[in-house]
Amino acid sequence: MKLNDLLKGDKKIILVILFVAFGLYIFLEFSSEMAEGELTSIDNIILQALRNPHNPKELLGPKALLGFMQSVSYLGGVYALGAVSAVTALMFAIKKKFRTCLLFILSVTSGSAIMVLLKYFFDRPRPDVVPHLGEFSLGSYPSGHSMVSAIVYLTIGALLARSTKSLKLRTIYLSLFGALVFLIGISRAFLGVHYPSDILAGWCAGIVWAAASYLLARFLLRKKNDKT
């Protein structure tokens, strides 16, 4: 199957391609500004605004906020994302959707590898303007929690949305998983282990990677169907 055949009559695919290109452009622009140090001052202002001005070790808000943010942050960690990815891949295998299973695994593993390479490439130090209230590893830019959670959870949300014809259910799936990715990202700022710009860049990179993986999966799966 040729690419023209895939795009023919499918405006959504064209929109996704444009979205990927735009998202990549935004990420590159953000990265350029970060490398020049243009974002640090506003990043620090935001991080300080989230803390008690009289005690930077405390979040500004109810005492339960810290525990909530730490719990949400865990959902974007290696162990939680690994478990969710493994269960999702297993479900595909049980339903004998082996090609979709393989594509999902490749999307998550390759996206995670790209995230690590980006961290080593930019090598941005972690924020030091407020005390750290959460665990972290490697460099600060982009946020691994934001990027990989976007790849995993948004992909699952998109797959669930495609499994139903109900617009209401599609909206619910995408909204719930989108909200989860959002909360995971901002939790890293509340915990003081990421600059807000790290999180925005992570979201951008993760969404672009998930969208690009969707395009690849759609192309390969439709190509298989054309041969059957």
Image (cartoon, helix red, strand yellow):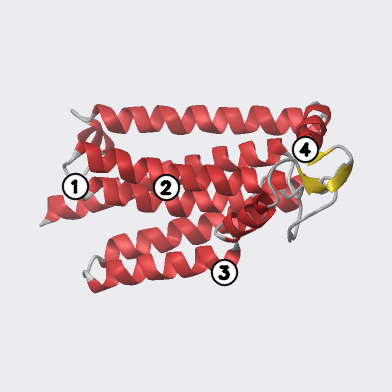
Choose the circle earlier in sequence order: 4 or 1. Answer: 4
Confirm or deny contact between disc 4 and disc 1 (CB under 8 A).
no
Q: Secondary structure at mark 3?
A: helix
Seen from the viewer's position, the closer of residues 148 and 208 is 148
Counting from the top left corner in percent of width and height, residue 113 is at 59, 58
Kind of residue sitting beneath label 3? Tyr
Choose the circle earlier in sequence order: 1 or 2. Answer: 1
- Disc ID at residue 47: 4
Residue at label 3? 79
Residue at label 1? 164
Residue at label 2? 177
Choose the circle earlier in sequence order: 1 or 3. Answer: 3
197 sits to left or right of 147: right
Alpha-carbon span between mark 4 and mark 3: 26 Å
Counting from the top left corner in percent of width and height, residue 8 is at 20, 29
Q: Quadrant of residue 86?
A: bottom left
